Image: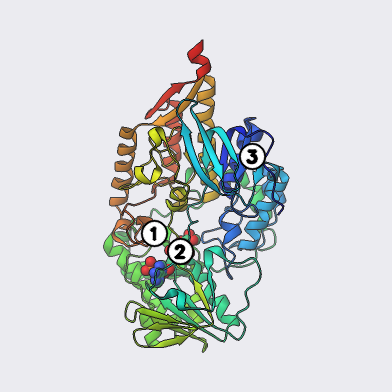
Amino acid sequence: MAKHSVAKHDSYDAIIIGSGFSGLYALHHLRDTMGLNVRAFDGAGGVGGTWWYNRYPGARVDAPSSPFYAYTFSEDLVNEWEWTETQTSQASVLAYLEHFAEKFDLTKDIQFETWIQDARFDEALQRWTIETDTGEIATAQFLICATGALFIANKPDYPGFDDFSGECYHTGRWPHEPVSFAGKRVGVIGTGSSGIQAIPEIAKEAAHVTVFQRTPQYSLPARNRLLAEGELAQYREDWEELRGSMYKRGGWPFKTTRRQAAEHSSEERRAVYEELWEEGGIHLSINSFRGVLVDKELNEEVSQFVRDKISELVQDPETARKLQPDYHFGTKRLILDNGYFETYNRDNISLVDIRENPIESFGRSSVRTRDEEHPIDVLVLATGFDAVTGSMLNINPKGVGGISLEEKWSERFNTYLGATVPDFPNLFMIHGPSSPGVLYTMPLGGERTTLWIAECIRHLQENELASMNATDAAAASWDKEINDMADQTLYPLTNSWYVGANIPGKPRQFLAHLRGSQYFDRLSDVAQTGFKGFEFKASALSREA
Ligand code: NA7
């Protein structure tokens, strides 16, 4: 996509960083609905955010997708976009976002291939100033950070890693040119969602795949299929109702179960798990019995059910043993796969458990574990991201008194409402730490957060105020609320990227609000009751009056 030159004037009402789902919607809403003068910047060469970068083979939405992983605000869009599969592919999501950008004429206000190098709050002017890597400076009253929860790639810091001289790709930074695996020996490090989606596809083409696994995973069958004749038409017909349900429930229109485990025998419960496994998708996690993520005993029953399934699916008992997860089911990001476990029945794949047999060094075309040297031509790093906080810290904005976000977040990732940070007035994050973020339907979460940001802006405009700043007290109490909620569940007990455990040295903190619908009710409530928890500064105009 062609690079747009910076607009003639460099002073805006709002600057948006990022042009993924949330950034694009924010641009559309703030510019077209509110009439603001808005400019967006993105380091990528085109729209799409996560979907622009994550082009690895097999990349798909890892949640119930068509047609729910999409914008909900425009019935036009719902009616005109032709989803084809139940689990949407990366290419299809990206095409949808490109269509969205074109339909609403958004790209003319986005500057691509431009990284924000600095962002500073000017207290005298009560405005943000940004500097780009292309040498431009721009100012705005509002800085909207739609920078993505899964953006900064986590690359393992293995000693001697640079000795490897073969091809090497991170799943989150996949090349735009096709990567050929034909006839090659491929090593994949990492078995999160990305690795588990990519491995079956790579194995179809490569001479051999060696998977280096640190933590075995629970993965449920996605059972991706083409949408049946009439299915999309039915969704469209029911759209108002479905949308209403998405708002009321956790971002999806599905009802979660009210069934109580204690009221059923273990045989009956097993039959329920079997039925939900066959149904595929996330149903086993949300529809079996109440409390799977709270009650250790019940969780262990579901965990064991999935372990048994893995043993049934994988023919070699030693490989099946290595694939048995041992953490609480559902407390790491749940994975949906298309034939992952079955792939281990091929004769061109082997699994190395690097907890038993750690990676020690790299050769020019090999990975050496303690017991063995594995010849590798192509190395795929499916090692995830510095999730949720990484993309904001990468920008490291400077707030009141020049305090940097890095300093502010040195011990805890404090936010108020998951969208603002004390001492960073008029800076808004979409999917920030302690928002529902990745645990909610992200496109809908982006829409709803943007609507709240719009209310904040309207409030300032109507009251001739220049800025709003969350108080430390409000952030501390929000932090407590999020943690108390998480502590009632099994989530914090597991080393996952939800608690920052995948990044050495990252402060451990549960990074998401667990009840999406309540969260958005809360945002509305804060807006309707005079924005409790914020301090305001009057604009120069009203000060003079
Ligand atoms: P994830 O879910 O963070 O998975 C990363 C995988 O890489 C996981 O298996 C990690 O093991 C492994 N990993 C991370 N660092 C290392 C090192 N140093 N050595 C070996 N293995 C390592 O990232 P994904 O890209 O798969 O998915 C991210 C999200 O994107 C996903 O949840 C979806 O929402 C879409 P670990 O489990 O930490 O032991």
Q: Which mark is residue 338?
A: none
> Image quadrant of ligand 1?
bottom left
Of 216 and 237, the residue lying toward us = 216
How far across and down, in percent of the image, does residue 370 sit? 34, 84
User: At 52% across and 78% down in the image, what residue appears?
Assistant: 165
Element at label 3: helix
User: At 46% across and 25% down in the image, what residue appears?
Assistant: 124
The residue identified by callout 1 is: 497
The residue identified by callout 2 is: 384
How far across and down, in percent of the image, does residue 469 sit? 41, 30
User: At 45% across and 42% down in the image, what residue appears?
Assistant: 397
How far across and down, in percent of the image, does residue 12 sit? 60, 32
Q: Earlier in the sequence, mark 2 or mark 3?
A: 3
Q: Residues within 10 Å of mark 1 (few under 14, many from 20)?
A: many
Q: Nearer the viewer, mark 2 or mark 3?
A: 2
Q: Residues within 10 Å of mark 2 (few under 14, many from 20)?
A: many
Of 354 and 139, the residue lying toward us = 139
State which quarter of the image contains the N terminus.
Answer: bottom right
Amino acid type, residue under disc 1 in the picture: Trp
Q: Is mark 2 within 8 Å of ligand 1?
A: yes
58 vs 48: above or below = below
The answer to whether marks 3 and 1 mark residues whose Cβ atoms lie closer than 8 Å is no
Amino acid type, residue under disc 3 in the picture: His
